[in-house]
Image (cartoon, rainbow, N blue to C red):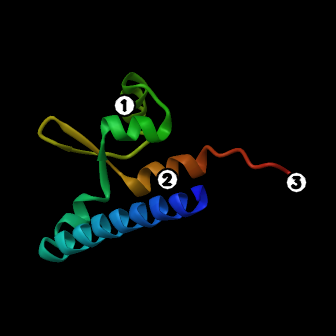
Amino acid sequence: MSVIFDIIVAINKMRQDISELSSRIRNLCKYPSRLAIDKYVDEAVAGKMLHLKPSRLRSMRADKEISFIRSHRKIMYHIDAIQKYLDEHTIKSHK
């Protein structure tokens, strides 16, 4: 009986996820310019992605270790710049 309950819960979760995804797709179709905005993250999100404190991100910007854009006082990082930094600082095993 608990297996059936687990299946019902999983189906309801999938239904909710599909509904949210459908809503996001409709929103992007209405406002395609948001696709470009989604490629940038703010300093808090970039710090979480890189596991760095804001002070370390500031010094990385000053040392030109990571690219960014500034719009007035807002600092934004392109997802590709974050991925490039991660790729450049990944230590690869010899195996």
Q: Label 3 vs label 2: CA separation?
A: 23 Å
* Residue 46 as seen in the image, left or right of residue 51: left
Query: Which residue is denoted by mark 3 in the rendering?
Result: 95
Name the residue furthest bottom.
29
Q: Secondary structure at mark 2?
A: helix
Q: In the picture shown, does residue 87 fall above or below 74?
A: below
* Numbered circle sitting on residue 83: 2
Question: At 43% from the left edge and 32% from the top edge, which residue is drawn?
Answer: 60
**Identity of the residue drawn at 37% across and 46% down:** 67
* Residues at discs 2 and 1 in contact (Cβ within 8 Å): no
- Name which residue lies at 15% across and 35% down: 73
Q: CA distance from mark 3 to mark 1?
A: 36 Å
Earlier-in-chain disc, 2 versus 1: 1
Tell me: residue 13, above or below residue 52. below
- Point out residue 37 in the picture as x, y percentages from the top left corner: 23, 59
* Amino acid type of the residue tagged 2 in the rendering: Gln
Mark whose residue sits in front, 2 or 1? 2
How many other residues sit within 10 Å of disc 3, few (<14), some (14-19) or many (≥20)? few
With 70 as the anchor, is 49 left or right in this view? right
Q: Earlier in the sequence, mark 3 or mark 1?
A: 1
Disc 3 to disc 1: CB gap under 8 Å? no
Residue 53: x and y in percent read: 42, 25
Compared with 35, 65 (above or below) is: above
Kindly identify the amino acid type of the residue bearing the numbered disc 3. Answer: Lys
Point 88% across, 54% down: residue: 95
Q: Nearer the viewer, residue 79 or 34?
A: 34
Name the secondary structure under disc 3: loop
Q: Would you name the residue on which mark 1 appears? A: 62
* Residue 2, horizontal then vertical, whole percent: 58, 55
Which quadrant would residue 42 be assigned to in this image? top left
What amino acid type is highlighted by mark number 1?
Ala
In front here: 38 or 26? 26
